[in-house]
Image (cartoon, rainbow, N blue to C red):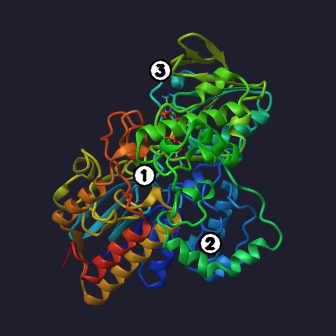
Amino acid sequence: MKTDYDVVIVGAGFSGLYMLHKLRELGFRAHVFEMGDGVGGTWFWNRYPGARCDVESIEYSFSFSDEIQQEWNWTEVMPAQPEVEAYLNFVCDKLDLRRDIEFETKVTALTYDDASWIVETARGRRVTCRFAICATGCLSAPLEPAIDGLHSFGGTTLYTNRFPKGGFDFTDKRVAVIGTGSSGVQSIPVIAQQADELYVFQRSAAYTLPSNTRPLEAGELEELKANYADIRRAQKNSPAGTVRFGAFAAFIPNGPVTKIMDATPQERIKAIDDRGWLGAFLWSDVMFDIEANKAATELYGEMIKRVVKDPDTAASLVPHYPFGCKRVIIDVDYFETFNRDNVTLVDLRKDPLEAITPTGIKTSSSEFEVDVLVLATGFDAMTGSLLRMDIRGRDGRRLADEWAEGPRTYLGLQIAGFPNLFTITGPGSPSVLSNMVTSIEQHVEWIADLLDEMRSTGQTVIEPTTEAQDEWVGHVATFAFGVRVDPTCASWYLGANVPGKPRVYMPYSGGVPQYKAKCDEVAAADYEGFVRT
Ligand code: NA7
């Protein structure tokens, strides 16, 4: 059967761009649909003030082209949003990708029919393709919080995950930020510098560590570039796909050996005296023993007290849930910001948010009049971007029904009953627990090799068996224990930030090298667990 394209890719972020390039290189007719009017995906939409990556630029970048990595010049250790977006535009131009990307075109439905997919868009386009690849990202379905009166607010409402392209000037404005995940924590210090008054509405305090970002020094980038072969090799062999995971480096391969539960109070305090914020967590038992985790949080609270002058504010800034169950944030001057005269923390655990009114925010004890409302309230992570499309597989089965109790995939790459549909960094793969770029490259290359092989052997349809999928889902679930699934922690890894979403720990926690070895083994065993016809 003749289709309009061999492959349709949904999304033009890191994964969609590389997938397009790879398929074009192999001679496939590939086409990308992208909702935004530019490339970048997550890095296109999340352009809020202070947005910054938590992996170093030298590693948060494509490794597949030495020309690209030698030509592009990073200016900072941890790249800020504008630089990542500029980098992706550079890659796009360099590889002449734009001509195969259809912008401002949201895919609304994907329907499997007769060994091919029908793709429908919000603009009324309907095209067919043999393979459909969802490069839709893990954090791209924005959440609107269920707060009474949200749409009654008469001032300006801004979402961090859809921030205006030209930025926003907060000068002389009274501002409220709701949400203290990464987006809130990164934007609050920047907004505070401009705003007249800033109220921070916090439901859950954040575990955040100071970023080690700084401008790259003269000669430093050149030296790093000269070592790229070694850096990339090390990345691929490291559990998180990065060897310089900013502030987290110390947690990753050969972690600390001393237990906090064996340490005296004096030894604990000495740890933060000597090592600062990291001293609170650099103990071998913190991730495995909930009492150790609580002791580490107490030390973290001590650090907060050393920075934040107001004792009530300092106490409210200590998280009530275990360290490590949510993604740890990196920040620039977050705690210091609460010492400013124009910044007030509103602890919603003590003073719950009741409603948004036409003039501001009402809590159970007060009313706050503001001009601007900034919502940093997160995403329907990992599955939202897929389930917001109407995806129907073999015999009309709906993905939304198949995943009613949580996502089920084989290797995070394919779904039983949905032949020829692929997800890049889908649930059940390391994705958000790793350097996304490392994981994206591995997925793209694996899918490209598979499609190339299928073409050469005359195969047209591939789908995982339910047995292989069940086994993989079971394996992924074996890591869902301890702090990861702590009932006090509403993490998006677990779907617990979305009312009614099934609680399933979605990413694969076994590490990048182990995961890649499994994917390679499957391919070498004639794509074991998949049926091809
Ligand atoms: P997050 O990390 O999901 O943070 C969302 C924040 O918004 C979090 O503090 C929530 O509190 C808060 N929130 C959500 N709904 C409400 C309501 N109704 N009232 C008050 N507060 C609310 O999203 P981000 O965009 O910051 O970061 C997402 C990821 O992007 C991040 O992990 C990095 O990997 C990059 P809660 O914790 O639910 O109590």
Out of 376 and 460, give the one closest to the viewer.
376
Give the residue type at disc 2. Answer: Val
Looking at the image, is 498 positioned above or below residue 80?
above
Answer with mark 3 or mark 1, whichever residue precedes in sequence: 1
For the point 36% across and 56% down, which residue is it?
427
| Disc 3: which residue | 148
Residues at circles 2 and 3 in contact by the CB criterion of under 8 Å: no
The percent coordinates of residue 504 (x first, y second) are 31, 46
Residue 279's place in the image compared with 500, above or below, is below
> Could you tell me the amino acid type at mark 3?
Asp
Whether residue 472 is situated above or below residue 208 in the rendered picture: below
Badge 1 marks a residue whose secondary structure is loop
Q: What's under tag 1, amino acid-wise? A: Ala
Q: Which residue is mark 1?
A: 122
Q: Where residue 333 is drawn, which disc sits there?
A: none
Instruction: Tell me the residue that label 2 is attached to.
Output: 91
SS category of the residue bearing label 2: helix
Q: Determine the residue positioned at 29% across, 66% down.
A: 117
Give the x, y percent position of residue 457: 26, 89
